[in-house]
Image (cartoon, rainbow, N blue to C red):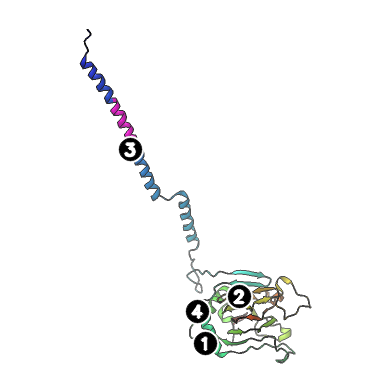
Amino acid sequence: MMKVNKGRHHHYWSKKLGLTVVLLFCFFSFLLGLIVSAFINQDISNIRPRPRLLKSIEEGREREREHNPLPHGNTGEPSMSLIPFQVLSWKPRALYFPSFATSEQCESIINMAKVQLKPSTLALRKGETVESTQGVRTSSGMFISASEDKTGVLDLIEQKIAKVTMIPSSHGEAFNVLRYEIGQRYQSHYDAFHPAEYGPQKSQRVASFLLYLSDVEEGGETMFPFENGVYMDSSYDFKKCIGLKVKPRKGDGLLFYSVFPNGTIDELSLHGSCPVIKGEKWVATKWIRDREDED
């Protein structure tokens, strides 16, 4: 009978069991490493911005650098202004400024004006009389300068107009605040004065700024019948409401130029106010001249 060597058998199983334990330990260590690595990577990704986010941050910083105010002159301003506008036309040059004034500012101007309204008048051309021009302008209105307004609203509006036109406020006439009721209108006309029709002028109206003080349910548009050179034949009826039309919206502004840079009158700047069909129209007009107002 063969005799079994118990010591050698025991050594064999001990060695095999130890190898198994080592392999299991390595396997679980590997799994533990994967889990820990996943958590670490997740934390890092939450801390570090992704490449796209980094790019966005850098672009934002770049925009900040681009919009930093520059050193300014003695008559300049220390900060930048954002006044949105839309070019409505190049012929004539007309720009639209949404939300140029607040609703409260508009109401303040109306309240100042309504107690002083009188029938609107016209600057008469050679040969014209009050009787012959009846019906051309049927609104009521009044004049008020920024210095007469104790609330300071007109001064703020005036300074803002000077900023968008780059023409000092000293070149502006007093505000002409107008009210158009149902059926009232202003037939097509020029704001600039032609010397052949009105005689010699000390200065010329070069631009007009209209601040709409109210919404109008229907009608009341500011019209430019000759926009882009259309309807310029001699058969045009100045009573017609045609061409480019700008609907009044409370607080919005309209700027247009009556004169070219060389000083000649832009014939395409002919404009008028369409009849109010429903509601009421309030507007404050600022005429701007090529020289300081001496009045």
Residue appearing at x 34%, y 36% in the figure = 31
Q: Quadrant of residue 158?
A: bottom right
Specify which label sits upstream in the sequence, 4 or 1: 4
SS for callout 2: strand
Residue 186 placement (x, y as % from top left): 67, 83
Specify which label sits upstream in the sequence, 4 or 2: 4
Q: Amino acid at mark 3?
A: Leu
Along the line of sight, the residue nearer the viewer: 182 or 176? 182
Specify which label sits upstream in the sequence, 1 or 3: 3
Q: Alpha-carbon distance for marks 2 and 3? A: 72 Å
Q: Alpha-carbon distance for marks 4 and 1? A: 18 Å
Q: Amino acid at mark 4?
A: Glu
Label 3 crowd bin: few (<14), some (14–19), many (20+), radius 10 Å = few
SS for callout 4: helix
> In the drawing, what numbered circle is on residue 32?
3
> In the drawing, what numbered circle is on residue 148?
1
SS for callout 3: helix
Q: Quadrant of residue 203?
A: bottom right
> In the drawing, what numbered circle is on residue 254?
2
Residue 22 as seen in the image, left or right of residue 282: left
Quadrant in which the C terminus is drawn: bottom right
